[in-house]
Amino acid sequence: QYGCNCRGEGSEGGCGELDVAEVIETNTAQDKVSTHYYFYDGSVSPGGDNYATRPTDSAVTYLTIFDNSGEGIVKIIEIGSDNFDFSVDSVSGDTVSAWLTTSVENLLS
């Protein structure tokens, strides 16, 4: 997984990394997802990882929204596995706005 990772290589040819819903191998119950990011310089997100419980007996869908309004918001929302229509070509602005205003819940940090 990390053999070709370019974290810490700087902006010239380097990269950042965003893990949206990673199940960390040290979590043997596999009942939590972790969200975290690394910057170009290899530093980690302020405050460390954010953890949330996840179902282990059913499927789930995670929505990731990158808000380009200048606020630098990345929001990750868990919805049921059947609560999103993957056949649509686009999502309405009203729907995205509703997702962006969804309260923060289920954090274990």
Image (cartoon, rainbow, N blue to C red):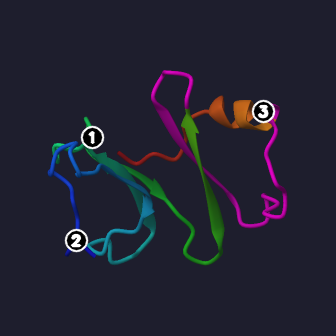
Mark 1 lies on residue: 45
- Which element carries disc 1, helix, strand or loop? loop
**Disc with the residue nearer the chain's start (3 vs 2):** 2
Residue at position x 16%, y 43% from top?
41
The residue stretch that appears in magenta? 68-94
Q: Earlier in the sequence, mark 1 or mark 3?
A: 1
Q: Nearer the viewer, mark 2 or mark 1?
A: 2
Whether tag 3 and tag 2 are in contact, CB under 8 A, the answer is no
Left or right relative to 3: residue 99: right
Q: Position of residue 65 (x, y in %)?
A: 59, 42
State the separation of the CA atoms marked 2 and 1.
Answer: 21 Å
Residue wearing tag 2: 4
Front residue of 12 and 36: 12
Q: Amino acid at mark 2?
A: Cys
Comparing marks 1 and 3, which lies closer to the viewer? Answer: 3
* Whole-percent x, y for residue 85 in the image: 82, 60
Residue found at the very far front of the displayed protein: 12
Q: Quadrant of residue 12?
A: top left
- What number of labels is visible? 3
Residue annotated with mark 3: 93
Percent of width and height locating residue 98 = 74, 32
Mark 1 Cα shell of 10 Å, populated few (<14), some (14-19), many (≥20) = some
